[in-house]
Image: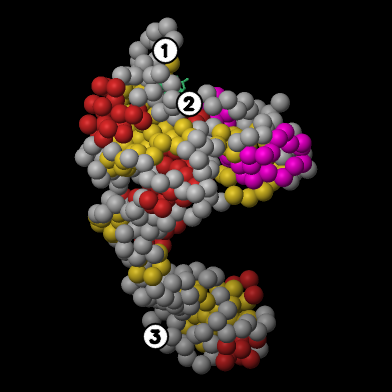
């Protein structure tokens, strides 16, 4: 049962933006959260905001190795010198209060003693006979890290929906937060379909190919923190596809398939899914990746991706990735796209919005630019491995000369350096 199509599209060919808006406007965060230790928090999404339970820095402390004193003593500091009253080391504060005309030897990270309000760096001071002379006046608060300068206690430092990377985990640790409450990982069931698909470890029969998409999708899902339920290779046979959906139902939050979603004689995924759930089948006006199915099976979302490996990767990146991020409770920003000049001429056939594999790098004069990552057929996996970006080329664009400005979107995956010819 199809929902009404948005006004700016036809069933034959839906605009990319309209399809994306429909996917992102439909999925909602999965219920459920858990508390994990910071050691296990990498890549997880906060279900509750992280509220600072303390100031950061917690104490006024020195940003330099030097001498701590009161700016009120500047005249003595520049003239006769200050009496060295002791030391303040990181973790070993100076006991007591600084008296008039006194200073304390202080090292980076050590607490500023009571009575001091500034630090002169050691390179700008000399010690003669136990007295410290400062070369020139230093403003109050110089080289002192103030309490709460970084984060104030009570502040919501990381909002709910933040994905935790190294910097966010370090921030939580600096605030003494040993655990965080995160959204649960989405469970994603995965199958590939096609009679030609051969599992790794088996010899290829005539016309066979290895099932690379299962590894592609599994890796892209792992990178997003999903728990993968691998349903294996499914034959081009309606009964087999039916069994796969039956197995996936109720076991996963999302089912992803690759292949069998076009309109060929052996493409059963779409029709079989329609027996189970509510499906949109789109021929999207984009290249690569024209056919895409999106649907709902009970509480489970379904993405039927095209079988050509690059089409699978690009449709996953553009549609499934932001949808999964939403399901995980994150608020994904729109993809960061920016303009760069082409370092070489580029071939583009007018007609469809084209996501070409590209490499952002430096041109001959050391200026940033972008060039093609190689052959652009939707079966060409070597240029996918080489690419660090997608060139987003509008439908009406044709061939482009070197120097033409194009829109670039960086890819989140590692790219393999290729020898430039
Ligand atoms: P399909 O979408 O089933 O029409 O497949 C389109 C093309 O992608 C065909 O050349 C398939 O052999 C290829 N293909 C389909 N599934 C996979 C897969 N899992 N791994 C690699 N290539 C695939
Ligand atoms: Mg097929």
Q: Disc 2 designates what residue? A: 308
Q: Confirm or reject: label 2 Cβ below 8 Å from ligand 1.
A: yes
Task: Estimate how packed mark 1 is, as few (under 14), some (14 to 19) or many (20 or more) residues with alpha carbons within 10 Å.
Answer: some
Q: Disc 3 designates what residue? A: 96
146 relative position to 268: left or right: right
Among numbered discs 3 and 1, the one appearing first in the sequence: 3
Eyeballing the image, is 109 above or below 222? below
Which mark lies nearer to you, 3 or 1? 1
**Quadrant holding the N terminus:** top left
The image position of residue 147, as x and y in percent, is: 44, 77
Per the model, the C-alpha gap separating discs 2 and 1 is 14 Å
Q: Which residues are magenta?
A: 380-408
The image position of residue 49, as x and y in percent, is: 35, 65
Per the model, the C-alpha gap separating discs 3 and 1 is 80 Å
Q: Nearer the viewer, residue 101 or 34?
A: 34
Task: Estimate how packed mark 2 is, as few (under 14), some (14 to 19) or many (20 or more) residues with alpha carbons within 10 Å.
Answer: some
**Quadrant holding the C terminus:** top right
Residue 289 is inside the magenta segment? no
356 relative position to 277: left or right: right
Q: Is residue 159 visible?
A: yes
The image position of residue 218, as x and y in percent, is: 37, 33
Helix, strand or loop at label 2? It is loop
At horizontal 24% and vertical 54% (from top left) the residue drawn is 32
Eyeballing the image, is 108 above or below 229? below
Per the model, the C-alpha gap separating discs 2 and 3 is 73 Å
């Amino acid at each position: 049962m199809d929902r009404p199509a948005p006004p700016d599209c036809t069933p034959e060919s839906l605009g990319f933006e309209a399809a994306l808006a429909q996917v992102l406007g439909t999925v909602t965060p999965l219920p459920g959260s858990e508390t994990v230790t910071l050691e296990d928090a990498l890549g997880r999404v906060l279900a509750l905001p992280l509220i600072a339970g303390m100031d950061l820095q917690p104490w006024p402390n020195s940003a330099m190795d030097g001498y701590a004193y009161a700016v009120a003593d500047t005249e003595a500091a520049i003239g006769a010198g200050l009496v060295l009253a002791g030391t303040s080391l990181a973790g070993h504060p100076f006991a007591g209060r600084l008296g008039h005309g006194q200073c304390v030897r202080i090292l980076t990270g050590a607490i500023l003693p009571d009575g001091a309000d500034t630090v002169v760096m050691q390179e700008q001071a000399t010690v003669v006979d136990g007295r410290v002379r400062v070369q020139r006046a230093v403003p109050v608060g110089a080289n002192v890290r103030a309490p709460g300068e970084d984060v104030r206690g009570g502040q919501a430092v990381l909002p709910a929906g933040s994905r935790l990377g190294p910097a966010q985990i370090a921030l939580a640790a600096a605030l003494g937060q040993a655990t965080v409450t995160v959204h649960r990982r989405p469970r994603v069931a995965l199958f590939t379909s096609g009679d030609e698909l051969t599992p790794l470890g088996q010899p290829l029969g005539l016309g066979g190919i290895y099932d690379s998409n299962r590894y592609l999708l599994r890796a892209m899902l792992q990178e997003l923190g999903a728990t993968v339920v691998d349903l294996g290779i499914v034959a081009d046979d309606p009964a087999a596809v039916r069994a796969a959906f039956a197995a996936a139902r109720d076991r996963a939050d999302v089912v992803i398939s690759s292949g069998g979603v076009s309109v060929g004689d052996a493409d059963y995924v779409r029709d079989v899914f329609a027996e189970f759930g509510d499906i949109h089948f789109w021929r999207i006006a984009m290249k690569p990746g024209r056919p895409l199915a999106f649907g709902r099976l009970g509480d489970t979302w379904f993405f039927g991706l095209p079988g050509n490996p690059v089409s699978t990767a690009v449709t996953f990146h553009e549609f499934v990735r932001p949808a999964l991020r939403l399901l995980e409770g994150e608020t994904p920003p729109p993809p960061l796209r920016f303009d760069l000049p082409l370092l070489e001429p580029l071939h583009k056939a007018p007609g469809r919005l084209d996501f070409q594999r590209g490499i952002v790098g430096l041109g001959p004069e050391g200026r940033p630019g972008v060039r093609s990552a190689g052959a652009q057929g939707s079966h060409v996996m070597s240029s996918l491995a080489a690419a660090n970006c997608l060139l987003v080329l509008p439908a009406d664009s044709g061939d482009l000369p070197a120097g033409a400005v194009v829109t670039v979107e960086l890819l989140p995956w590692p790219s393999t350096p290729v020898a430039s010819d």
